[in-house]
Image (cartoon, helix red, strand yellow):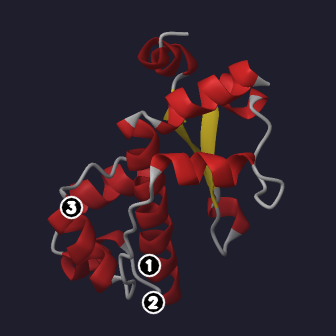
Amino acid sequence: MRNRDNIREKILNQPSYWVEGINSFLYNAILEYMEDNNMNRTELASHLGISKGRVSQILNDGEINFSIEKVVQIALKVNKFPVFELKDKNSYLDDLNSNNHKTKDLSYYENDSFSEVYSKNKKDSKIIPLYSNNEFKKQLAL
């Protein structure tokens, strides 16, 4: 059990873990906004103030990688408030380890992880890799 806690803590201490989570939220919000407003990529690009090529990069590859300012701007343009919260590490880990908090089995973290992106149109749903197993294990020094 202690080894699992150490691996979980290493994962949670990786900036890429948190960045990919934020990217996933923004990706889903963009996709939802596009579908709700029956927009094509050109219209979405114009609305967001980014190039059509950049929209394609986001929608095809899940490649977000914007500055915090741009993430906030885009979130507001897709009718979302970007709520951000900082939590004490020890309290967060205690919450994860408590019986009151549902967490995935650690084996989930030991395999390639993916963010499942849902679309109202099931044929457009896709899974975006968040990181490669080998690359992430190197980051964790496992």
At x 25%, y 73%, the residue is: 72
Decide if residue 2 is on the left or right side of residue 27: right
At x 47%, y 86%, the residue is: 38
Residue at label 1? Answer: 34
Check disc 3 and give the amino acid type: Ile
Tell me the SS state at disc 2: loop
In front of the other: 90 or 135:
90
Residue at label 3? Answer: 68
In front of the other: 115 or 140:
140
Decide if residue 58 is on the left or right side of residue 118: left
Check disc 1 and give the amino acid type: Met
In front of the other: 12 or 40:
12
Can the viewer see residue 111 in this picture? no
At x 32%, y 52%, the residue is: 64
Q: In the displayed structure, would residue 112 be above or below residue 29?
A: above
How many C-alpha atoms fall within 10 Å of the one at disc 3: few (<14), some, or many (≥20)? few
Residue at label 2? Answer: 37
**Quadrant of the drawing holding the C terminus:** top right
Tell me the SS state at disc 3: helix
Check disc 2 and give the amino acid type: Asn
